[in-house]
């Protein structure tokens, strides 16, 4: 049975907004944050680069804002699939730990979360978990940032098959965000809890939680990729409960929104395209499905490389579709690519995790 193909999302808030003060020139940083909130990631990158260069030029006196700016730039790069530079910037931020003084804990917490998210997306679950455990030690008190860290660690446990531990942390994160007024951070946790409910065959609760997530998305960010993500989640639940027409309707709504906000075939589109293709295959509409798998492959190859772990599931699906359409050579090629990746498996004690599986969202 195929694992669901989902891309992870972060609940980590930007460090820059926490430390900017009126005594420093912060216009570029503020503009960058505003662009990021609107999902205008290229524009955010441009502004954050200016901010990084300015605070770098100040030397030791600008190190706090330099670290925060690098973290924000990394987030903007990561959102565009520019993973190599994003990882380097996160690692540079973490390396400044001893120079940050009293600002170390909050900036370090955000950088650790962001780097952990990248490891999570790249199926490096143990590395991600260790970074998040360190982040929990540096997160001061309860609040939205700690709630985000708990959520991210719970997502790791979810993908390791440690569902009980995951659910406990999701519930803690949810309660903490509610207490702190972090309404915008609730949808990802509602979605995971919905998945856990669906796994227990409690479809009514799963749907209720999904609709809560959708209502918040529509209220807070009606023209943001996060709304498309939630529409895709709902479509996936509908696919799993054999309401295929409704599922396809939500996948199309999600993809249309993404096309208008971040452009066609953005990284955010990959999981939705995949689930759309899977649904079409279930309806024996294989000829329509195969081009969607091919689009997913192109997106992920562009972002992560042709041999990345997250491609194996898509290669397998594309191989099955190609074989059904009597495209034997193509099917063989896809199977060989998938096999090369699936030979690498990660053992987490009682659970052997297929390293090709996407992360459950959001």
Image: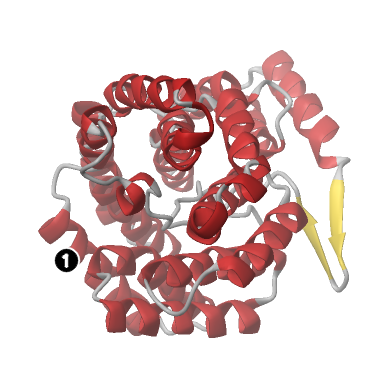
Question: Measured from the top left, where is residue 36 in percent x and y?
Answer: 28, 37
For the C terminus, give its image quadrant: bottom left
Seen in the image, is 349 located left or right of residue 119?
right
Q: Name the one closer to the observer, 315 or 328.
A: 315
Q: Secondary structure at mark 1?
A: helix
Q: Is residue 42 visible to us here? A: yes
- Which residue is disc 1 drawn over? 215
Measured along the vertical axis of the image, is residue 326 above or below residue 32?
above
Question: Measured from the top left, where is residue 103 in percent x and y?
Answer: 49, 56
The residue that appears at 51% across and 77% down in the rendered structure is 196
Determine the residue located farthest toward the top in the rendered image.
329
The residue that appears at 15% across and 42% down in the rendered structure is 223
Seen in the image, is 180 located left or right of residue 304?
left
Binning the other alpha carbons within 10 Å of mark 1 as few (below 14), some (14 to 19) or many (20 upward) gives some
Q: Name the one closer to the observer, 68 or 10.
A: 68
Q: Name the one closer to the observer, 76 or 258.
A: 76
The residue that appears at 25% across and 29% down in the rendered structure is 40
Question: Measured from the top left, where is residue 88 in percent x and y?
Answer: 63, 29
Query: In the rendered picture of this protein, how many numbered marks are placed on residues?
Result: 1
Measured along the vertical axis of the image, is residue 48 above or below residue 91?
above
Seen in the image, is 244 located left or right of residue 297?
left
For the N terminus, give its image quadrant: bottom right
Q: Quadrant of residue 259?
A: top left
Question: Measured from the top left, where is residue 269 in percent x and y?
Answer: 39, 35
Measured along the vertical axis of the image, is residue 252 above or below residue 191?
above
Q: Is residue 325 visible to us here? A: no
The residue that appears at 37% across and 85% down in the rendered structure is 175
């Amino acid at each position: 049975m195929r694992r669901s193909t989902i891309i992870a999302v972060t609940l980590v808030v930007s460090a820059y907004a926490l430390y900017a003060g009126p005594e420093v020139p912060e216009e570029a940083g503020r503009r960058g944050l505003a662009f990021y909130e609107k999902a205008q990631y290229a524009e955010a990158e441009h502004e954050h680069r200016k901010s990084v260069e300015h605070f770098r030029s100040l030397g030791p006196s600008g190190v706090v804002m330099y670290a925060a700016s690098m973290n924000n730039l990394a987030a903007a790069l990561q959102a565009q699939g520019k993973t190599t530079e994003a990882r380097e910037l996160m690692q540079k931020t973490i390396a400044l730990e001893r120079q940050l003084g009293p600002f170390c804990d909050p900036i370090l917490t955000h950088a650790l979360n962001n780097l952990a998210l990248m490891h999570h997306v790249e199926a490096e679950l143990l590395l991600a978990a260790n970074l998040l455990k360190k982040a929990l030690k540096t997160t001061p008190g309860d609040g939205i940032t700690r709630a985000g860290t708990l959520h991210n660690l719970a997502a790791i446990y979810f993908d390791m098959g440690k569902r009980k531990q995951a659910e406990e942390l999701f519930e803690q994160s949810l309660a903490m965000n509610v207490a702190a007024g972090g309404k915008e951070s609730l949808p990802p946790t509602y979605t995971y809890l919905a998945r856990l409910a669906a796994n227990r065959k409690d479809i009514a609760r799963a749907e209720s939680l999904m609709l809560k997530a959708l209502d918040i998305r529509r209220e807070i960010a009606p023209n943001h990729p996060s709304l498309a993500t939630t529409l895709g989640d709902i479509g996936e639940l509908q696919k799993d409960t054999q309401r295929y027409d409704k599922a396809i309707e939500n996948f199309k709504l999600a993809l249309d929104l993404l096309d208008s906000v971040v452009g066609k075939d953005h990284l955010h589109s990959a999981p939705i395209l995949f689930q759309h293709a899977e649904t079409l295959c279930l309806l024996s509409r294989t000829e329509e499905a195969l081009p969607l798998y091919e689009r997913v492959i192109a997106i992920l190859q562009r972002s992560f490389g042709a041999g990345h772990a997250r491609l194996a599931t898509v290669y397998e699906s594309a191989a099955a579709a190609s074989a059904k359409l009597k495209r034997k050579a193509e099917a063989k090629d896809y199977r060989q690519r998938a096999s090369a990746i699936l030979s690498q498996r990660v053992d987490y004690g009682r659970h052997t995790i297929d390293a090709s599986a996407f992360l459950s969202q959001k």
